[in-house]
Amino acid sequence: MGFKEKKSPKILGGVGVSFKGKATLIQGCDFGTEPYLVEIGDRVRVNNGVRFVTHDGGAWVVRNMYPELKDVDLVGRISVGDNVHIGTGAMIMPGVSIGNNCIIGCGSIVTHSVPDNSVVAGIPARRIESIADYISKHSEAFIHTKNLSPEEKKRYLQESLKNYEYKR
Ligand SMILES: CC(C)(COP(=O)(O)OP(=O)(O)OC[C@H]1O[C@@H](n2cnc3c(N)ncnc32)[C@H](O)[C@@H]1OP(=O)(O)O)[C@@H](O)C(=O)NCCC(=O)NCCS
């Protein structure tokens, strides 16, 4: 199983999530009660507080109303493609497939499948732009700091960017 656990060694302990490649799971993500219905692609980052919901708890109400439905469940697989970032606190609902090269905004509730190369955000999550749009929008603001050490990055951000402002 190719995953890179970050901060939480407990997170995957025997829960049955299927990993196609390398994934980084940040502390506090929750694979729900049917984790074996979740498939995660290659180079996927699941951020803090993300929840995969694989069943609809609404079945509880139906079960209590109709004897012939007293044992029903409503469940759905969740799949995540390759090269996906799932932002802090997002919730992925049953039956959703997220395509390749996608960004899921912080706090989103994803109720519909997400096409490849999309940025989605909000409640319910809507496609706000393509990945190409996201890149061109931020082309002036991207900084090349990812491979610096934490100390180098701190120095760079404190010293070199005194006049830099990323405004929104
Ligand atoms: C989704 C995201 C990638 C969009 O970034 P962006 O391209 O810079 O988008 P903008 O901020 O220009 O927002 C575009 C629109 O989407 C809305 N939007 C952006 N992020 C949103 C979110 N998480 N939830 C709801 N709406 C959101 C904005 O309000 C804006 O709406 P408007 O046009 O009506 O004003 C970014 O907001 C996000 O959530 N990134 C993930 C952050 C994260 O996980 N951080 C942890 C780092 S490890």
Image (cartoon, grey):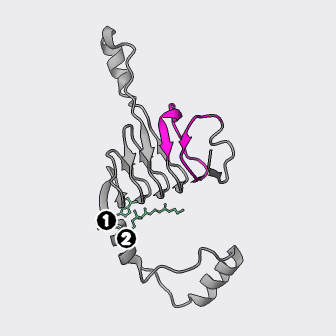
Question: Residues in magenta?
Answer: 14-40
Question: Going 69% across and 75% down the picture, which residue do you hit?
Answer: 149
For this view, does 43 lie left or right of residue 78?
right
Q: Position of residue 100 (x, y in %)?
A: 41, 56
Q: Position of residue 146 (x, y in %)?
A: 59, 74
Question: Given contact means CB atoms under 8 Å apart, are the residues at marks 1 and 2 in contact?
Answer: yes
Q: Tell me the residue that label 1 is attached to.
A: 129
Q: Is mark 2 within 8 Å of ligand 1?
A: yes
Q: Position of residue 42 (x, y in %)?
A: 52, 53
Q: Is residue 133 above or below residue 160?
A: above
The secondary element bearing badge 1 is classed as strand
Q: Is residue 162 above or below residue 121?
A: below
Labels 1 and 2: the sequence-earlier one:
1
Mark number, residue 134 = 2
Residue type for callout 2: Tyr
Mark number, residue 108 = none
For this view, does 66 lie left or right of residue 166?
left
Q: Say whether residue 150 is magenta.
A: no
Q: Position of residue 162 (x, y in %)?
A: 56, 89
Q: Can residue 168 be seen here? A: no
The secondary element bearing badge 2 is classed as helix
**Which is nearer the eye, 75 or 163?**
75
Question: Going 44% across and 38% down the picture, which residue do you hit?
Answer: 53
